[in-house]
Image (cartoon, rainbow, N blue to C red):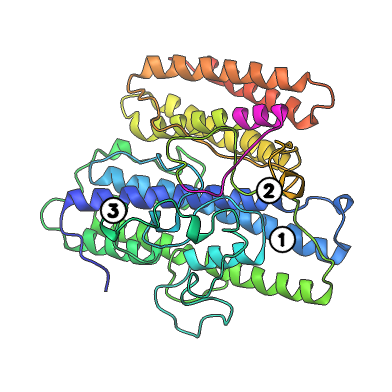
Amino acid sequence: MPTAIKSREELIRQLSIACELEHGLCLQYLFTAFTLKSSLNEGGMTMEEFTYVRKWKANLLFIAAQEMLHLSQAGNLCASIGCGINLLRPNFPQRPSYYPTNLPWGLWPFSQETIILYALYERPVQWKTAPPSWLPDDPFRENTFQQLLADAPIPKDPFGHLPDYFERPKANSYKTIGELYDAIALGFKDIPGELIVGPWEAQVSSSLVDLPQLIQISNRESALQAIELIISQGEGAPSDRIDSHFGFFVQMYSEYAQLKSQRPEFEPVRDVQSNPLSKLHVDNSFPGWRLIHDPYTRKVNNLNNNVYELMLLMLRHTFNGISDPIAFRQALASASLRLMTGVIVPLGQTLTQLPMGNDGSPGAATRAKYAGPGFEIERTLPDLPFSSAAWQYFEEQLGFLGEASHNLSLVPDAPEVITSVTLTLRQIRNQLIQIER
């Protein structure tokens, strides 16, 4: 039985945590998808094996897209009870105990351990059938994540020597994401009084964002319907349905294990560094990160980070800008989606083929060759409550980012995708300029 949520304040806090988890998992799934090879020319695969690899990549991207739906749905649940969507999160990586799930939290290439990790995040709250034999009951006792935490072994935990009462307070008391949503559902059922008090305009609909399954919350019943949608698609589904996120990961693990056993030389994954960063952030207090040393790769990652932050600002204003004209909010929602699909995804794919660079430190020559998107975020996001000022900010940032991308495209042997990214950024800016204010 999940812990009871007894007040609006507590419900807001737990919904904010749900937003944070959905956001972070979306980025982790994207990173892992980007590390899978995209062409037979990359080697290590037969045509039959490559068919599976393409399916795994497509499924990971699909699951990441559903996490964006869940994040938006959690945002509507927030708005219905009077608070805004939470789009802040810690940088990667974080110590397993940062969240009460007590699982590794970071950006990792595709591997059996990574699939196990994702299956644990998405596992059912209650099992109708026996769980897969490869899914551990206690992953740390069973030493499941030796590869994922190779750069951050438990004895090197900088907080490990401290007494328990110095540990970071738990964000919530739930062991699985499914338990968190079960508790949120009970909160919507049981909290007395007038619970649905937020302005209807603060919620987004499928007419505003391209998410046909998105539910607007008008009463407790529609709130429970929205939560059930999230649960049934993945987070703690009541049974291991094959079309749930958990079901996808079970199938992915079985297929990968079978192909690897049939041909040990099968290698579908690029040699990508886990948790790559352009710079250290104040919340990078857990080991496991690696700084990008190659100057060009670092600039491309910085471009991706800045586009990602701008996308978050646009998405937040889509939710919170209830005094804005509907055309403005629709334009921001469309721009957010184009930034993700037309800039962040191609840059992320490209970064897994750009060099980390050799920093000359011991063991550098044996480390992963390629970088990846760090999805780095500053401690705070600018607050842009005024429509005219927000509009100006978005136009300016798109201009700056388009110019930065253009400069990167002029470097000799620059990837062709940088040119297409430049064009996309300029097109998005021009479309915003044409919207009547």
Magenta segment, which residues?
286-303
Mark 2 element type:
helix
Q: How far is disc 2 from disc 1 in space, using C-alphas? A: 13 Å
In the rendered structure, which amino acid carries the disc numbered 2?
Phe
Where residue 399 sits: x, y (%)? 58, 15
Rendered view: 362 above or below 136: above
Q: Left of 199 or right of it: where is 45?
A: right
- Tell me if I can see residue 218 in this picture: no
Residue projecting furthest to the left: 193
Using the rendered view, name the quadrant where residue 372 is placed: top right
* Residue marked by disc 3: 166
Counting residues from the start of the chain, the first of labels 3 and 2 encountered is 2
**9 vs 360, nearest the viewer:** 360
**Kind of residue at disc 1:** Lys
**Mark 1 → mark 3, Cα distance in angstroms:** 45 Å
SS label for mark 3: helix
Q: Between tags 1 and 3, which lies in front?
A: 3
Q: Residues within 10 Å of mark 2 (few under 14, many from 20)?
A: many
Give the mark nearest the N terminus, 1 or 3: 1
The residue tagged 2 is 34
Quadrant holding the N terminus:
bottom left
Sooner in the amino-acid sequence: mark 2 or mark 1 = 2
Up/down of 274 relative to 160, above or below: above
Q: Is residue 388 left or right of residue 192?
A: right
* Contact? badges 1 and 3 (CB < 8 Å): no
> Which residue bears the numbered disc 1?
55
Q: Is residue 222 magenta?
A: no
Amino acid under label 3?
Phe
